[in-house]
Every structure is written in structure tokens, then in C-alpha cells.
Image (cartoon, helix red, strand yellow):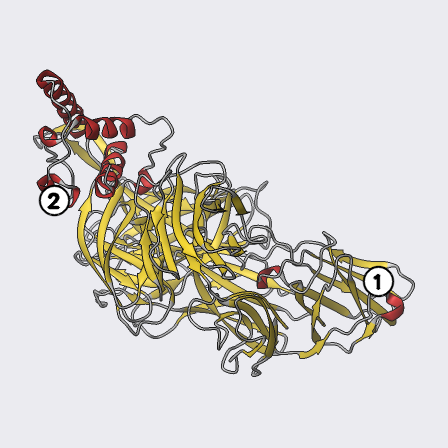
Amino acid sequence: MKRHLRGGLIMLLACLAVTGMRAGNSAHIGYLYPAGGLKGTTFEITAGGQYLKGATNAFVSGSGVEVSILSHIMPLTNQERQKIREGMREQQKALKDKKSSPQKMPKSMQMEDWPDDLRDLDFSKLGLADLSAVKKMLYDPKRQPNAQIAEMVKLSVSIAADAALGTREIRLLTRNGLSNPIALNVDPFQECHEREPNEKEGTNVRTLPAVLNGQVMPGDVDKFRFRAKKGQKIVASVRARSLIPYLADAVPGWFQAVLVLHDAEGKELAFVDDYRFDPDPVLRYEIQKDGEYELLIRDSIYRGREDFVYRIVLGQLPFVESIFPLGARVGESPRVALHGWNLPVSHAVLNLKKRGAGFHNVQVPKLGRGANRVACALDTFKELMEREPNNSSRVAQSVTLPLTVNGRIGSPGDSDVFSFEGRKGQKVSAEVLARRLNSPVDSILKLTDAKGNEIAVNDDYKDPAAGLTTHHADSRLMATLPATGRYYVHMGDTQGDGGVTHGYRLRISWPRPDFKLRLVPSSISLHSGETVKLSVVAIRRDGFDGDIDLALEKTVPGFILSGSRIPAGSDRIPVTLTAPRDFPSDPMPLRMFGLATIGDRKVKRPAVPAEDMMQAFLWRHLVPAEQLMITHLPRKWKRPPLKLDSDVPVELAPGGTVEIAFRSAARHVEKNLELDASDAPEGLTVKAVKPVAGGADVVLEADAQKLKPGEQGNLVLEAFGWREAKDKQGKVTGKKRRIPLGTVPAIPYKITAK
């Protein structure tokens, strides 16, 4: 079957799988296909998702990429599905009665000419082979229809010739607001798209380097054929999990791609199913003779779905496997040694002078087009290079704190030991940066005294800020020194591995209390005057446990942030954002930050926008986004349902109640007003709601067994009312339906002693 026919039938099947959508839900993009393109070109892509009806525009981060909406395909209703089944049966019967051989589909009915929503499909112009293919796809037991990717929006994408290479974020604007962001790649090479069926013949790749695009369906094996010459060092680098980090309903939680390279006779030459600890595999192979080769990609256990999207960068391209050192001091541009494939230089200087402390992904100069980015880190402490031999306390490398050591587990079984002078009662903190910088080191840290007594040890430290990491293999410890004397920090690899790629950065210092912030979600859609709930996560470091005050940058005036303090000891709180009566209609960035006093320092940290993504039905990860985007929903002025008229924080004792007053901007308050507590701690409940003139009084109750003095946080209330239900003719049925009225601005609370 031709590619355009198969592609259309896939869309038809997705439409058949779901009956409709619920109004009022957030727009969601599950995948893009293809997930990128060549700069200087215009092409079409499909966004698969849910609640995308009414998509009017698309927004891409950065500059040089323009996107326009072409069409929207909704899931079919049950009646429409039945109509299609009947049409198939009638055409099958008609073709058999005529006893004529099946004809290929007329050119006039090829997929590009079919209606976008497929509802007016003329089965009378399809042959038996086409009908058989439709039936096979409709009733394929291996397929797993998913409502979250059933809708489709076709987009036209234009990338300027001078657009910067790399990954962008694209969001769709629908009648339900902004969607989540999803990755869109801008690349410098020709694009090649799989042509089905390609399980036997494969898709021809005319020139290298190229970017290969495809979607793996259940049981699918995609093949690409290319020519190569003896001596070429071919690199095939997959982007799959990097495009869609987590799948909520798939185990292990992403498309686990496998790459296999065959020669012209079908002999397997290379096989990879990951790259170190990264699920996206990278295949490297030196060609032994001129000829044709075949690259195969599939899922490791032959799963598949429309969101199993991939891009493979294929060619004799530079690929950096490691750099050393893995970072530098803030304000410096380190000269690093390079290790990898097809590298024209052995060393390079990374331009990091204008970068601040933290993690950075940078392009290595002088490597040419298509080279992968490398991860590095900057810090404020002095830098020191590890010096061998130092694999035991007897020959430990003496250091003076605080500092960052740049080291390498140079061979299997190697370990590095560093010694320093400490005083009794002094606190020491040590942290490894390796796995978070794409090093294969699986570190273990140990702190001992001069007699070899173990003071502290740590294997794995889970860093909530590393939202794309699922195996947290870096180590971190903090300890109080029991006596004055010499101490030893032992650094090793738990797997006993080592080599030129096994670099690390080891910070040894006094505790450095600090924090990071994550803000969920990264797309906010609201009406004039409306209040929405957000979640802020505080990632505390080195013992910092104080208050953090949140605030908005003054880039967009009029927005009100309620519940803007993360109390001491809290790691996650709900807050609310209330829109002004008038604000721009086009989506725009909004920035939030946190302020805290740490010792004698005033510390300001950005609240990094993130998506709270589920992996494999269970685990959750905060995946950072480039920016927080907010958009104005085009409706009339919407007053907040209630406004707090009591002092904050609201205080109540365990086992007690408190009555708080609200005022309403509405002409009257719902007689049957209900308030549900959202994100409330267990034991804090709404006991009663009493409508009064101009507002309402709300009684909160604290459970004596579940709440303890000192607990603090924010209470977010959702308001509901009741309306008489009516039938299709507009007559009252006698039943009532619950109507959401909006979110009440966050109420800070504090549990006090009796």
C-alpha cells in the first residue's frame, strides 16, 4: 500500500478509537510527527493529542520558526464509526458480486485529496486490497488506541535558513487555552521519512548525512538502506526519549529504541539498545567495505503506537563521547580534552565566560555541523585537578577546603582519595557530579577519619531537579566531624568500571545551604479576573530549611500571586494566580522567583517552569521547560467567586475550628454554595459554608489526630453551585447539576498550640 494511503489509514484508525472529548479540559500534545526538519525549508507535521479542537495558532520558542494551523481531525462518534463499517461491507459485497479484480485507488481519491476529517470517505472507489488493509488495521489486536493522542492537528512549519540549530518548544493555542510544550528539532541535514511497507525492502536514504524519521507501530520494524565506503566511521544517533521523555501508560515509560546494522547479505554488524545509561541508542561502526547497508530500528519488546516517534541522525558525523574536565570555575572558559568519533581536533575551548553557576549543555567549537552537545558544570569554588597515585589513604591527595576536584576513574577498580584538615564540630559536605553530566561513573562516596573509621557514606542521591534522570547515580553526603584532625574522602565507582570517559567533578566544602524552585505547569490559560492554581516545589540543599517568599517579575502588571510563601520545612505548596481585568490576548512569558535569607545572604532563585510527567503508571518527574507561558482566554470579565476578608495566615488549633469571612464581587452568592479543599493536608476540612450578605462565612476544622502544631501551608478552595438540569427541549427535568464557579485565591494557614 502506498505511504500516503497507510498514513491516512493510521489517522482513520486513531479517529475510530475514541468517541469524543470532554469540554473544559486542558489541551494536550502527545507527539509530533515528524518532530523536526531542515532549516530553510517548509514542511507539514501532525500533532497528536487531546482537547485540541479549535486550535488557532502555534507558538515556538526562539526565533526563525513559523507555524500555521492547516486542519484538525476529531475522533469519530459511534454513529460515524458504524457508517464506515457499513460502507466497507457494501463495497466488499459489490466488488465480489462483480467478480472483477481489485483496482488500485484512483488518483483522484488518493489520501491527500480526502477530506481531512475522513467522514466523507467514498468507499465505492476503493479496491479489495485497500478494504482489506483498513479491516486489518481496525481489528488488529496488537493496537492500543489511546484517547490522549486520538485527535490530530496538521501544521505547516517554516524554518528560516538562518534559524539556530537545536531543540525548540512548540505549544498549540486552542479554545481551551495553551497546550503543554513539546520538542521540535531544527537540523542542518536532509530529511528522510520512512515509506511503508519497509520491513523487507527498507526506505532508501539517498545522501548522507541525513535525518531519518518514522513512527514505530505494534510489531513494527523500520529499515533504511544507505551506501557507505570502506573506512567511513558511521554514527547513528537516535532521538526518541529525548523527544518525548515519559509515557504515562507504557513500561518502562518511554519508547525503548533498538538499532541494528546489517550488510547487504543481511549479516548483523552492530547492535545497540541504549547509550550507556541513556535509553536513546547511539550506534558507531567503521565500514569494512564499499557497499549497501541496512539500518533497522524497532522497540526492544516490539511495542508501538503513534507516539513512538523517532529521529535518527545518520552519517560520518562528529560525536563527542566525553570531555575532560567536566567543568570550570564561573567566569572561566576551560580547555577540554575530547574523546569520541570523527573529531577533527583533540582539544577545544568552551566559551563559558558569560554563563552562571549550574549545569550547561554547550556546542563544542570547531567540530562542524551535526556534532552533539556536551554537558558541563560551573561553580564558584577554586578548581583542582586530581593527581595520581591517590587510590588509598596512604597516598591520598591533600586538599584545602572549599574546592571542586576534576577527576577521572581512570581504569576498572580505580578509586581516588582526598585528605583535608578538619575541626571538631565542623560540618562537611561532599557531592559528585558525574551521571548528571553524562559520565558513566556510578559513584560512591565515603568519609573516614585518620584511623579508617567510617563517618558517612552515600551511594545514590536523588536530585529532584534532574527531571530527565531515572537512575540517580551521583553521590552526596554531609556530616559533622567528631574530632579535630585529618579526614579522607574516598571516591569510587560502585560497578568497578573505569576508563577515559569516566570523568567526574567532586565538590568538597563546608555546607552551602541553598534551594531551587520548580513551577508546575509551564502553560497557564485563564480568563480576565480568573484565579488558577499552580504548584511550587522547593528543592532544598545542604540543610537550608527556612522560609522562601515568592514573587512575580514586573513584566506583566496586574497579576496577583496568593499564598506566596513557602513555609520553613515545606517542600511543595499550592499557590494561586489571579489575572487582572485587562491583559494582552497573545500568549506571553511570565516569570516567578523566590527570595530567602540564608545566614547573612539574600538569595534570589528563579522558579523554573516544569511539566509534572508520569512514567509507567507510577513514577512522576518534574521536566523543565524553557519558559512559563500564559494566555488570555477570550471570554468576558470573570469575577473571582470569593475574596478572603480575614487576616492571614488563618490560625487554628488541632481539634478546633475557625470561621473565616469572604466577600463576593457578584451580585449575590449561591444559596447552595459548596467549597472543596484542593491540596489540603489530611485532617484540614471545610466543615460548613454559610452564605451571608455580600459574601460567605466558611468554617474550617482541624483534626487533632492528623495535624500537629507548627504545620503551615496554603489552602486552595474550589467553589461550586447548583443549577436546574434541562433536557434537549429546554424543559426543567427536576434534577440538579453541579456547576464549577472558580478557584478561591490561596489561603495561608498555620496550626497552632491549643
Q: Which of the two residues, 15 or 128, is positioned nearer the viewer here?
A: 128
Q: Residues within 10 Å of mark 1 (few under 14, many from 20)?
A: some
Q: Position of residue 508 (x, y in %)?
A: 72, 70
**Farthest top residue?**
97
Q: Residue at x 35, y 75 (%)?
A: 554
- Dot 2 falls on a residue whose secondary structure is helix
- Dot 1 falls on a residue whose secondary structure is strand
Q: Amino acid at mark 2?
A: Asp
Q: Which of the two residues, 346 or 519, is positioned nearer the viewer here?
A: 346
Q: Residue at x 10, y 37 (%)?
A: 106
Cα–Cα gap, marks 2 and 1? 74 Å
Answer with mark 2 or mark 1, whichever residue precedes in sequence: 2
Q: Amino acid at mark 1?
A: Thr
**Mark count:** 2
Residue 216 position by quadrant: top left
Which residue lies under the disc numbered 2? 113
Q: Where 219 falls versus 453 (above or below)?
A: above
Q: Position of residue 611 (x, y in %)?
A: 42, 54
> Does residue 224 appear left or right of residue 484 in this picture?
left
**Farthest front residue?**
290
Which residue lies under the disc numbered 1? 448
